[in-house]
Amino acid sequence: MDERGDTVVYRLGQDCDLDDLEEGKIYEGVVQGFANFGIFVQLNNRLRGLVHKSNVMSQHRERDPVLVEVLEIRSNGNIDLRETVCDAYQISEVVKKRTTTSISDLGSRIGRYVHIDGEIAQIKQTSGPTIFTLVDESGTLNAAAFVEAGVRAYPEVGIGDIVSAAGEIMQRNNQLQLEVKSLSRLEGADVLRVRDKIEQALDERSEPPEVPFLIRSDLLERLKPEMRKVARYIRRAVFTAQPIILRHHADADGISAAVAIEQAVTALIRENGADFDGEYYLFKRAPSKAPFYEIEDITRDLDFALKDRVRFGQKLPLIIQMDNGSTEEDEPALMRAQVYGLQVVVVDHHHPDEVVDKYLVAHVNPYHAGGDFGMTAGMLGTEIARMINPSVEENIRHLPAVAAVGDRSEAEERGRYLDLVKETCPEEWCMKIALALDYQQFWLRFNDGREIIKDILNLNGDPELHRNLVNLLVEGAERAIEMQVEAVMPHIEARSLPNGAWLFQIDVEMFAHRFTFPPPGKTSGEVHDRLCQKYKGDPVVTIGFGPDFAVLRSRGVLMNIPVMVRELRDEIAGGGVTGGGHLVVGSIKFLEGMREEVLKGLTEKIGEAPIEE
Amino acid sequence: MDERGDTVVYRLGQDCDLDDLEEGKIYEGVVQGFANFGIFVQLNNRLRGLVHKSNVMSQHRERDPVLVEVLEIRSNGNIDLRETVCDAYQISEVVKKRTTTSISDLGSRIGRYVHIDGEIAQIKQTSGPTIFTLVDESGTLNAAAFVEAGVRAYPEVGIGDIVSAAGEIMQRNNQLQLEVKSLSRLEGADVLRVRDKIEQALDERSEPPEVPFLIRSDLLERLKPEMRKVARYIRRAVFTAQPIILRHHADADGISAAVAIEQAVTALIRENGADFDGEYYLFKRAPSKAPFYEIEDITRDLDFALKDRVRFGQKLPLIIQMDNGSTEEDEPALMRAQVYGLQVVVVDHHHPDEVVDKYLVAHVNPYHAGGDFGMTAGMLGTEIARMINPSVEENIRHLPAVAAVGDRSEAEERGRYLDLVKETCPEEWCMKIALALDYQQFWLRFNDGREIIKDILNLNGDPELHRNLVNLLVEGAERAIEMQVEAVMPHIEARSLPNGAWLFQIDVEMFAHRFTFPPPGKTSGEVHDRLCQKYKGDPVVTIGFGPDFAVLRSRGVLMNIPVMVRELRDEIAGGGVTGGGHLVVGSIKFLEGMREEVLKGLTEKIGEAPIEE
Amino acid sequence: MDERGDTVVYRLGQDCDLDDLEEGKIYEGVVQGFANFGIFVQLNNRLRGLVHKSNVMSQHRERDPVLVEVLEIRSNGNIDLRETVCDAYQISEVVKKRTTTSISDLGSRIGRYVHIDGEIAQIKQTSGPTIFTLVDESGTLNAAAFVEAGVRAYPEVGIGDIVSAAGEIMQRNNQLQLEVKSLSRLEGADVLRVRDKIEQALDERSEPPEVPFLIRSDLLERLKPEMRKVARYIRRAVFTAQPIILRHHADADGISAAVAIEQAVTALIRENGADFDGEYYLFKRAPSKAPFYEIEDITRDLDFALKDRVRFGQKLPLIIQMDNGSTEEDEPALMRAQVYGLQVVVVDHHHPDEVVDKYLVAHVNPYHAGGDFGMTAGMLGTEIARMINPSVEENIRHLPAVAAVGDRSEAEERGRYLDLVKETCPEEWCMKIALALDYQQFWLRFNDGREIIKDILNLNGDPELHRNLVNLLVEGAERAIEMQVEAVMPHIEARSLPNGAWLFQIDVEMFAHRFTFPPPGKTSGEVHDRLCQKYKGDPVVTIGFGPDFAVLRSRGVLMNIPVMVRELRDEIAGGGVTGGGHLVVGSIKFLEGMREEVLKGLTEKIGEAPIEE
């Protein structure tokens, strides 16, 4: 009875279960079936009980409404009821006592009906259900809502909304999924409360575990805070189902750096229980053509990302640049990224220009901490990969050594990383791997070649294949280099400069095989190495030039290429001179019609540079 | 009893419902279940009634056949039956009184079993059901037929067949779908009847609504009938689920024209209730590399369309060409389209060659109605878009102004279109948008960049992003132009021609930055503008040439480039001269080895051209 | 009773059916439903019987366990039971007497529960079930296992595993599918037994049917064993759901050869009952840019194949090379294929280098059997296609004739193949088809253009379209050739050589239209043909050269191009000379800067070559 004296009849909400039922109370029900000993009465979609024939008051047909009193709730879950009749009564709705479950606690709730508060990270329409990716403070969960094959469920819910979802937890193989029964946007203060909770928890989860570096290095210690920051952004992207685009320099160092991250991220995506195909569509690794983020590349990345957002409901991606991204040449691309609010993190060891920092959320660069080029991207990338996901360490610990020899690092860390794997991957083998990477990437053009690259780096658990493949590629690369050098060498023009240095010039388009390995830059390097060998002890400068470019290598001549380029730009009006690089290794571009003048000017400047003692 | 004196027993067809049942008649049934007050008997898949235990004649098991008389059909749909027994009887099949429902009337029939006559427009096999797209005189409907996951249902039914489909109407979000229970090809006279009805109704539906033009223009009024024809073809394609390929010139005018149509069509596809992904796979916008339909492009379009027809059951597409398609250079592609019976419509403002008309089903061109180039494709496209789908007007009404300034229109309509949006999109801003489009498209190469382009055109409802993006792009474009001009200007060769005109020549491959913005044609234009500025009042011709081409710009010289090209072709044997364009703006191609001779001949002709007073 | 005197109660396994039930025995059951005449008891998921109320011992609720004796199994499958009660009893599990069914016998078992032993050939995760492709000694079957939408079922089972699968056989349209109820890896001796049985049966199935050649040819008879071997590998790939990549020369002969195989294979895939889309993802035809397997091509093929293996569970592919693959230039690609253990078969008529054989599992080449180039790849391909699948013969029997005229075969087989189709496809029409193929492929670049190519070859059952398309293409090709020849001819440099031969030289980059049809090689050929016509009876050599290459055609001069190339390579240091071809038709590559020297040396050698009598 309620205060007005009416009988109270309870109506169970559809998500109520045994916990919400009380003996002695009267409930609304519906006749569901008949047995010779009584009738079954459904109390809601989830609960039904038996009215023994001795307790049946009247004749019923299926689906008839009926009032019943709960006599007993047995331990096995059976419910004994008695039919009852009231003339006047008061309906009281029984609302499920909602207890929100954390996504990380779902493992123990399989088959149970749960409530989850979270943020919508992605909405994917399949030809079956709509898959909502939910993120809460503890994890990521796919929630499948089915209206009809191929039809978007809950169209009023969008990415970034804070929602309350309810349904049954189903087990996948290693994953759980929510079968959505209801999904609705939270409003008002609830949004803030949940969002805050998620943000705070995400901050905690994204915090990388404390792992000591693979080697002792003061430089790494100084870089550590920024490295952890990069790891944090990446972990957070994984935990919030944000896509990741990893752009990197297409050489052995850049590949090593990027693959280390790839290993850490794809494993973390799988562990985090995302969609079975998540490691493919949430993570893309893309070698860059240029040693910077070209406008063409950001354009393509943005084009795809914006279309994916509209068509497939994905978040805008986190951009990672590795062995790339530190120089002013990246600025035009970064400006575009910024207009769209894209997060960009950079891990690079090229000499950084300050100008890029205003576009980046994190930027690891050894020059920021008193280091230099010798701390390669592959070293940094591998250490960051371990911060992201320590479980991949065993697989990737040889990557810094490969990167070190690939980039001819002379940093003290080089030796320590080589020492670390000297049993399993001695220096000579690292060099072979590095050459194999360069050669293979040349033929892959700008495809990632994920599996082939993993085979070259021995990440696929087939050491024999790894060995055979690397040997084959090295053999091919060496043969190609020999053939190129043989073609080029007879055409080298040598001269002695005023400062006593040798200058060697070679037209690498007229006198080299084109469109094959090694390309002009590497050809110039190989020639330079041989000339240095031949002119042991002498200062040597080698220029490989084409119609509108020149590549410089030098030994023993204290050039400053960036300064020389700037001077030539000013001195030669209409020369269209651009370029740069390091002090003694670099490249210059110019207008094709001005080649003679530019090369002349360049030669003069080289002839004036001081000679190293 | 029938005439022979036998009792008649009725057998209900599986799609019969309550309307087909009559009290007092005897029906075949099957025992379906038991209650303590009687047994349930199923009359067909959709109807079942109760035989009260007092009316049961014998003991039954489930699935036993039984004859029953209908005692009463209650208002709530319950059916009271009495078991009956006959020794000899006559079976009479009750066929559902078929009433065909129009697709546009389905909104009020959700959950009902309906019959639809229509034409099969597409057949898509999903990993679940087979989706048949049905078109009738009133609309388009997806019909899902399920045999088994991934299995083609009703393989005997093909595209273009006239069929009768039956099933239940299910609600999607904003869409309806037929759950197919039966689907069969109509035969004989039924085919003609239905096809005629559909054709006639489609003709009516495809008729564009009458909307006045955005501005007053006699020229537009004269073009109106042909514009409506284009709109009609496009509407019809949408209503019949025919894919559309929109090819367009990759400049600001062509993009504006094409995006206006894109907005109208994609919205109409959504409104028409097609598949949730229909706006993507039924509509493709593709910027063309050349200012005409290249053989390579039609080859690719045909290759894909024919494969899609075989593999995914799509119709062959309607081709739309915008800011492109009117000249004889399009003929080779159009001939290929014709062999396959492709429909092609053209909306262009380049000087038309009559020869193309025999390949086109509609062709809007201002020259056909006394207008000229000044009536840009973007103006025409926007007005046609409003005929296709007036609901998009608010979004696209600034596009003609962007097109006008982008193409430097001098038509009287230019000012009116600019006036129309002077508050929200003043002329200066239109110019920025146009430059931003050109610059962005350069980096997009020949991708449509749908979302980025919409952001530049402020179609995505984010005016701040729009502003920032346009400003960033304009800044980048202007810097690039300055850099290019700076490189080029010192290398210009000037001479005075016999007719008193200045001739400026510049080798845009030797003395300009290559493979970057601005490309040679635009570079020549920028140089020409600056020279016109400098030599104010004088007649000026600027030639930018490369190894095998030259781009011409002129002011104050009454040249006729197409005539000059024809003469050079005849005069210089083995010169391989081709090309054309407008009277005073154009381009010439020639054999690389004949450049000197061709440029000499060209210069002579320019020197003979009369000077504008 | 068992030996201990206890009553034995049987528990039916879930896959037991009526055959496993015996009258008089006692079984465990569960109460399933109530009727007024008794209760229904379920014995397992598939069997249930009735306990008449006279035989009911106690009051039950649904799902109550109960012991029952089988009184009678009626002929209609009904089972009469009696309830029984035992105090002490012994449980005995009844295991289904497993009878393995062969895949080829499933046609008569639709709707039945079957057991199949086989090898897993592919595992495809769909957004619905996981599809396992099973291969046994008799056929291929898709088996659908459903855990939950998009979730990989039986993750412990991998490709190549020998398994036992059980479930119900469902009918598709023309296909059967297993609805998996259980799937498990076999162990120990079972694996060997099943694998041996499968291998042996596969060997038998893969054996091509004996079909006589379309024409009489001793050469073909000698090549027959190796041709059958190729057919065997291809049939086996189809039967084991191994993907096939067919790489071929992009000319009329190569296309004819490849399309013949395509027709045979795609039809066989469909007949073999694979997935509805199998003919697309299991078979790829790819025209090659170069006349050999380029490193770039194998790199792309490997990249995709390895990714597909990891991501989509496909086997590594069988590679077929047609009109390609016999020369040492293929070696680098073949070495890469070998490292990954890829099977490669070659059908070529270029002069073979022995070195390739160690990488191939089969190699058909007329030179191996005393034949030569005149036995074209299209002839061989068509005959092999008939061995693979004789049912396609009617469609493809004109392909050898097209190939013969396309490659200017002078073998005796040429006339016989032309005779074969002289009614339906006379020689002149074959020539048109061949020209149309070359021209169309030029515009398709390196896409297969499957449907367009089939239209050109009249394989799509629309002879009118075929006629119109070929005529249009031939017209376009001829016009383009005329235009090119007209441009080139005025620039030919003629000279008389010491040996009395005419030498004609033409710079095909400076004096020909570029990037259009005909490309340099074909342009040289067309020019050569016209010069031969003009200088009837005289020995003629035509050299078309570009910056770093030269194409040679000759008549009446006994050159040996491979020897000349080798000599030039040795004589011109730093010339970078490579190349080859046939004796009197070939091409040379060199460093751009060495062109003059190389052409001079080449001319000298040609002038020394003996003249044909």
Image (cartoon, coloured by chain):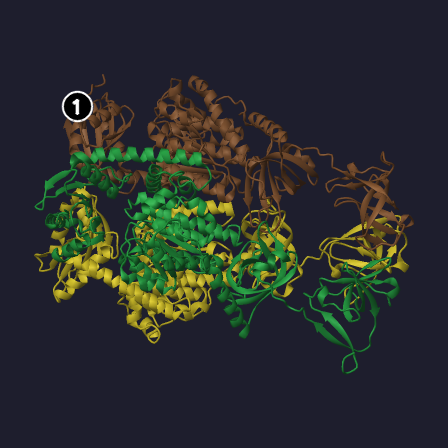
Chain colours: A brown, B green, C yellow
- Tell me the residue at 50%/34% (across/down): A265
Q: Residue furthest bottom?
A: B4
Image location (x, y in percent) of residue B362 = 36, 60
- Tell me the residue at 54%/27% (across/down): A206
Image location (x, y in percent) of residue A125 = 55, 46
Report whether C42 appears left or right of B343: right
Residue A555 occupies quadrant = top left
For disc 1, the marked residue is A607
- Residue nearer the viewer, A342 or A566: A342
Q: Secondary structure at mark 1?
A: helix
- Residue nearer the viewer, A30 or B458: B458
Q: Give the vertical position of C478 relative to B252 (above or below).
A: below
Report whether A195 appears left or right of A11: left
Image location (x, y in percent) of residue B67 = 80, 70
Q: Give the vertical position of A508 relative to C114 (above or below).
A: above
Q: Give the vertical position of C462 relative to C123 (above or below).
A: below
Q: Residue furthest right?
A: A54
Q: Chain of mark 1?
A: A
**Quarter containing the N terminus of chain A:** top right
